[in-house]
Every structure is written in C-alpha cells, then in structure tokens.
Amino acid sequence: MNSTTMPPLEVDDFTVTLHTPTLSVRPVDGVSYSVQAGEVLAVVGESGSGKTILNMAPLDLLPVGVDAEMKGSVRFEGRDLLNMSTSELEAVRGGGIGVVFQDPLSALNPVRKIGRQLTEGIERHLGLTPTQAENRTAELLTLVGLPDPKSRMQQYPHELSGGQRQRVGIAMGISGEPRVLIADEPTTALDVTVQAQIVELLKDLQKRMGMAIVIITHDFGVVSGLADKVAVMYAGRLSELGSVRDVLIDPAHPYTRGLLQSVPSLTVPMDTKFLGLPGQPPNMAYRIEGCAFAPRCIEARADCHVNRPSLLSVPHSASDRLAACPVIVNQFA
Ligand SMILES: Nc1ncnc2c1ncn2[C@@H]1O[C@H](COP(=O)(O)OP(=O)(O)OP(=O)(O)O)[C@@H](O)[C@H]1O
Ligand SMILES: [Mg+2]
C-alpha cells in the first residue's frame, strides 16, 4: 500500500482501560475503523459510551491524572500513536492531527490574547516567521467567519461569545493544516444558526484542504449534513459502522434503531421497527459478558448474553456496512 492509498487514520482493536485509585474501567473495548483522506466519520452514541476517550486517549489529551492503559493500535499515516514518544506525539498534535475540543475554553489560555495563542502554534507547526504567522492567523480567523480579525487577535477569550470562541477553537484545530481533524462536539451548546454555519465551514475546509475528519456528535442533523460514514458506539464498543445513508435510513443494530427513535425529524421509512431504549447502559467497571446491549434489547436471545458478537457484514447494504448483531444481520440476509 503506498502513501496515497493508505488511510491517514487506522484504528485497530483499540482498547483503553482507565485506572483510578479505586477502580478500573474500560471505556473503549476493541474498536476498529479507518478514515480516508477527504472522508468524514461521525462517532455517535449515548453520553458515557467512550467517544471522547476513544479519540483523545491516543493523543495523550485526557485530563491530567487519568492513568490510561492502551492496547491495539491507532496509526496516523502508518505510524502508531501508541508507540510514539512524548515529543513525537507533540509534533503530531496540532501538526498532522488537529483537535477541536468540545469546550473551546479548555483549549484557550484565559489570560493570553487570541492572536498570540494562534500564531505560536502556526509558527511551530508550519515553520513561519512571526509576521507570516500573524498574517496566516488573520486569514484563518476570516476563514472561520470572524470578521475584523486584527482586532479579534487583540482580545482575550472571555471577550468573545460562545459561538465566536468555538470558531476560534476550530481555527486552532485547523491552524497546523492537519491531514486529520478530530472534532469533539464542535457545535454543542451553539444556537442552531451558528451550528449550521460551523457545519458548512467544516465541509468547506474539508473539501478545500482534503482533510479526514472525525466528528463526535449527538446531533443527527450534523451527521447527515457533514459525514460520509457513521460509527455507533455503545458501552465502549462499536455496534454499527457504515455509510450515513445505510445507517440512518435503514439502521441494522437494535441500538442504532433505538438511538434514532429519539430523532423525530429524521426521514426514515414508516415501517422501520423502533425498539426504544429501556434501561441504562452497563457499568464499564465490570467485565461485560456477551453483547453489551443485550440487557436492553427486546431482540436478544439467550446466546446474546453469553457470546460477544463480532462485527458482521450486513447483506444488501448500499455500501460496506458492519453491525455487531448476528440476530438482525441474519434477518437482512
Ligand atoms: N476521568 C475519568 N476517570 C474515570 N473514568 C472515566 C473518566 N473519564 C471518563 N471515564 C469513563 O469513561 C467512560 C467514557 O467516557 P467518555 O468521556 O469517553 O464518554 P463520551 O461518550 O464522550 O460521553 P459524552 O457524550 O457525555 O461526552 C465514562 O462512562 C466513564 O466510565
Ligand atoms: Mg465526550
């Protein structure tokens, strides 16, 4: 495989165990997927399903003090992030891989001007002079829809609105001209108009720069508007992975069906059988036998509580699609 066909991001049997003084939890359990250049993958799933840990742990971006044991591999352009030294990882973060945080304040230093925070990263990752980096910063702020960038650059984070800060966060994420952008709920807590503008902006950037994007979101409007593929997470495992068209229009996994039930505006066939989501996700501090969703699933058979389902190819899908549910996959056959 040469570098033009190698997916820039390949996650293979990735498992994260978090050790705290009192217990160990496994928020990511055997996850595999890849993202091609110019492709957008949306990661969806209930709160606590492991979306943030899945994407931030390999980049060493978990909160300070969290002890994460990682297995499997997360390859960026063929190099495993899990084997990189701290300095190699630092060079990748903000360089080859850009990150947009859910809370833009966590990425911004409250006591330093916006402009300085952006130009520093640009100088470092693109090797530009301070003046060149300042001009590039102004261009970026204009690109993310912040007019009058020169005066913005003189402001502190608290002087901006939530939407403006989120745009600065996106500018920071793309400032190193990354080949992969990881965006953790970049539109959460924004009003609908601003959300739509951010989605348009990401689409535009993705086309213009040919980036691969992994976007974590709760919003199926964002999924259908932006993503090519969708990965559905449940209790740290992938339950379904496929094209947005397959997964949203004809969900295979009972969990995906239940998740989509809460989205009344979505165009789904009237005969789609929704199963709802009674009960709670499992506690990931305990070893989960069988299918993690089985206790909440009305399709579950005795076997589902015993054997962990692997991801199976779903027949008659418009494109490659996998679901971790032998019961339903057999019905598609
Ligand atoms: N600092 C921590 N210490 C211990 N366990 C943690 C910590 N952070 C997360 N976890 C565990 O990891 C699981 C996954 O967390 P994660 O933040 O990845 O969820 P998420 O899918 O991003 O949720 P949300 O949609 O609410 O952002 C949690 O359910 C929790 O059990
Ligand atoms: Mg999260």
Image (cartoon, rainbow, N blue to C red):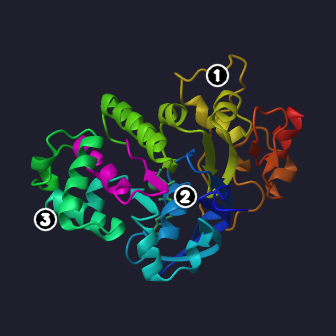
User: Which residue is the site of mark 1?
Assistant: 268
Q: Secondary structure at mark 1?
A: loop
At 23% from the left edge and 43% from the top edge, which residue is drawn? Answer: 164
Asked if residue 181 lies in the magenta stretch, the reply is yes
| Label 2 CB-ligand 1 distance < 8 A | yes
Q: Taking 309 as reference, is 320 above or below it? A: above
User: Which residue is the site of mark 3?
Assistant: 111
Is residue 288 toward the left or the right of residue 264 in the image? right
**Does the residue at mark 2 contact the one at mark 3 (Cβ under 8 Å)?**
no
Q: Nearer the viewer, residue 82 or 149?
A: 149
Asked if residue 305 lies in the magenta stretch, the reply is no
User: Which residue is the site of mark 2?
Assistant: 50
At 49% from the left edge and 31% from the top edge, which residue is drawn? Answer: 221
Q: CA distance from mark 2 to mark 1?
A: 27 Å
Q: Nearer the viewer, mark 1 or mark 3?
A: 3
Q: Secondary structure at mark 2?
A: loop
Q: Amino acid at mark 3?
A: Val
Q: Amino acid at mark 1?
A: Val
Crowdedness near tag 2: few (<14), some (14–19) or many (≥20) residues, C-alpha within 10 Å: many
